[in-house]
Amino acid sequence: MPTRLVHLVIDALDPPRLARFWSAALGWDVAAEEPPVVDVCPPGYTYPDPVALPLVFVPVAEPKTGKNRVHLDLATESAGHQAAEVDRLLSLGAAAADIGQGDVPWVVLADPEGNEFCVLEPRPVYRDTGPVAAVVADCPDPAALAGFWELAAGWAPFDSTDGWVALRSPHGVGPYLELLRVPDVKAAKNRMHLDVAPFTGEDQQAAVRRLREAGAVPADIGQGDATWTVLTDPQGGEFCVLSPR
């Protein structure tokens, strides 16, 4: 495996404010606040343990437009817990969101900057994930994309159905990465993206070359002369390849 998942990065108009919301929502700590970037991770977390995927909030000038193509699903333990979590999240500043979900057992909310997320009904498969059940990425063809993300994330296939594929750390811990088929076409840069990195002692540019051979494409999102490399996966989702860690 050339790389492994290390972060979920979230664009924000006000990174400290949005980080405080997600810290309270997940019961995690604001681990580092080095303006303009803010990191949030579980208490006592040892980076980059796959038991969790830290959140990194970065500043952007442009407001959110349209539904995000990457979102978080939050786990609950019972119907009562789900209802209580929804009430608690609303009290923290979340808002109810309608993305056309209809009559479903999960609840769709949006954080204070409008990023959609779901509070799931209890599901046994998520009983050991921690508060984040899954990072869900919309795409045209999950089955075709899954092999690429096995390579990029270093995660293993867990389950699949027609139109949905789930991957998880081979250690059997932490959240799932779920690829979900959607009919709409990507029209703008994702406001949430995954960061991957080679292991300590491995070569960043060799990892980039391997991912490009697997179908990734270089992307210019205005990053300038950065220490990381911005790519898109074979179906257009941006991600970054960081230095070894």
Image (cartoon, rainbow, N blue to C red):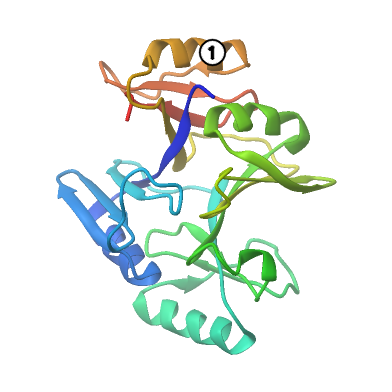
- Is 64 displayed left or right of 235 in the figure? left
- Which of the 4 quarters of the picture holds residue 30? bottom left
Q: Where is residue 77 in the image (x, y as percent from the top left)?
A: 58, 79
Secondary structure at badge 1 equals helix
Nearest the camera: 230 or 81? 81
Is residue 156 visible in the rendered image? The answer is yes
Give the answer, above or below, for where 237 lies relative to 181.
Answer: above
Residue drawn at x 36%, y 43% as measured from the top left: 48
- Image x and y of residue 107, in percent: 61, 73
Is residue 14 at least partly visible in the picture?
no
Instruction: Count the numbered circles shown.
Output: 1
Looking at the picture, tell me which residue is in the foreground, 15 or 152: 152
- Quadrant containing the N terminus is top right
Quick check: 152 left or right of 6?
A: right
Name the residue rendered at 52%, 69% in the picture. Answer: 109
Q: In this view, does 170 lie above or below 31?
A: above
Q: Name the residue under label 1.
A: 210
Name the quadrant of the C terminus.
top left
How far across and down, in percent of the image, does residue 42 sit?
33, 61
On the picture, is 140 further left or further right than 92? right
Above or below — where is 85 with respect to 208? below
The image quarter containing residue 24 is: bottom left
Residue 5: give x, y in percent of width and height: 46, 37
Amino acid under disc 1: Arg
